[in-house]
Amino acid sequence: MYKRILIANRGEIALRIIRACRELGVESVAIYSEADRGSHYLDLADEAFCVGPAKSSESYLKIDRVISAAEVGNAQAIHPGYGFLAENAHFNEICRSCEIDFIGPSPEAMTMLGDKNEARKLARQAEVPVVPGSDGLIEDEDTATEVAKEIGYPVLVKASAGGGGKGMRVAENEASLKQSLQQARREAEAAFGDGSVYLEKYVEHPRHVEVQVAADQHGNVVHLWERDCSVQRRHQKLIEESPAAHLEQETREEICAAAVRMIRAANYTNVGTVEFIVDKEGSFYFIEVNARIQVEHPVTEMVTGIDLIKTQLRIASGEELPFRQEDIKCEGASLECRINAEDPSRNFQPCPGHIEQMFVPGGLGVRFDSHAHAGYTVSPFYDSMVGKLIVHQPTRDEAIACMLRALGELQIEGIATTCSRHEEILRHAAFAESRIDTTFVERTWD
């Protein structure tokens, strides 16, 4: 096991990693921007270095400064968390060249899976179902028109290097396809520096189901069951749960087995997530692999009892997985609500500002992952997430009741939050009966 690692991130996930390090006896080195100077979670790290001004492009995304902090801090490895440099293959490669372990997959696996077109090819080779679409990238409008006619409208134009809903456009007919291609390319070029796109059949009203996986450096690959992330708005997840209530057991086992095949085919190591969409008939299709820990990892931890951050550290340091597939049980039901500093009544407008008072709920099966506290200022420079409220109960109905109780107790004064919208969703009959899809929130409230 490592003696000392650097955490190339901030806020909630940085605190989460610091805590895991402390329990493993690993020293942690934190980094921070000028905007995060004085944050209480930094006091829990063994050392902390400022890496630049508030803008992430001048601090958390500055590879040379992050590497310098790791070298000055005598870190043997870097944990990237999620966001920022977490899926940056170039940063991963630089860590390798500097003889600093990257706590995640290899640069080669990250590069291959980060290109959605290449990932689709690999999925086909691994006999993992993919959504019908183009065999490769779309180079011109004539090719796009031919593919769209073959698979049928509506079609989805997707950026090969995309993520978070950027570089995605739905075309309902041939007339809108040209415009969708141009818009998706422009957005992808601006966001990722890569305007290449491909076409998929647009699956209407799908569920979003993802499978948590872990793979060590000794050939052991396991899944830790699935999460349902269908409650989202504009491709941003709001509520996640495990297990996926609507899945038949046979489908659950098939989708988890497909995720393991995908990870083996990619020679992937460490923790990751294989994402799928599930149509109204129950057929599932591969979307992408997230080559990092995800925001919603706590729901998997709650139903399996496995600490995923510690698992990441153990795998990266060369240890074998301490469990096998037959050891991993999915027990009870877990829900997670992302508490963001946004105002649902004003089209989810971000509401950065000073938290005057904060009361955190408790009780059996309640967990609140957050770096925020009374007196903390939510910065306008970064993601608006204040924390994650997670519950675990024997059944889904009990988990919903527990979450509603916990949301009622959670008080964050001084800023607007998404708590009220979470309560509305959880009280809705469609959610209670698991009759939801990725368009549920927008159809119901927007």
Image (tube, helix red, strand yellow):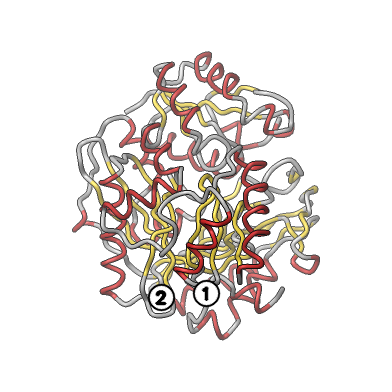
The image shows residue 76 at horizontal and vertical percentages of 41, 21
The image quadrant of residue 156 is bottom right
Task: Tell which circle, 2 or 1, labels the residue nearer the N-terminal end.
Answer: 1
Which residue type does callout 2 highlight? Ala
Instruction: Please give the residue where the numbered disc 2 appears in the rendered image.
Output: 245
Q: Viewer-nearest of labels 2 and 1? A: 1
The answer to whether residue 364 shows anywhere in this view is no
The image quadrant of residue 253 is bottom left
How dense is the environment of label 2, judged by Cα within 10 Å: few (below 14), some, or many (20 and up)?
A: some
Instruction: Please give the residue where the numbered disc 1 appears in the rendered image.
Output: 204
Q: CA distance from mark 2 to mark 1?
A: 20 Å
Q: Secondary structure at mark 1?
A: loop
Residue drawn at point x = 46 percent, y = 77 percent = 398
Residue drawn at point x = 43 percent, y = 16 percent = 98
Q: Secondary structure at mark 2?
A: loop
Q: How many marks are shown on the rendered structure? A: 2
How dense is the environment of label 1, judged by Cα within 10 Å: few (below 14), some, or many (20 and up)?
A: some
The image shows residue 54 at horizontal and vertical percentages of 74, 32
What is the quadrant of the N terminus in the image? top left
The answer to whether residue 107 shows anywhere in this view is yes
The image shows residue 263 at horizontal and vertical percentages of 30, 48
Using the image, determine if residue 122 lies above or below residue 152: above
Decide which of 405, 107 is in the foreground and name it. Answer: 107
What is the quadrant of the C terminus in the image? bottom right
Decide which of 259, 83 is in the foreground and name it. Answer: 259
Q: Is residue 2 left or right of residue 58?
A: left
Which residue type does callout 1 highlight? Glu
The image shows residue 295 at horizontal and vertical percentages of 52, 51
Kindly identify which numbered label has been placed on residue 435.
Answer: none
Decide which of 289, 294 is in the foreground and name it. Answer: 289
Using the image, determine if residue 90 lies above or below residue 141: above
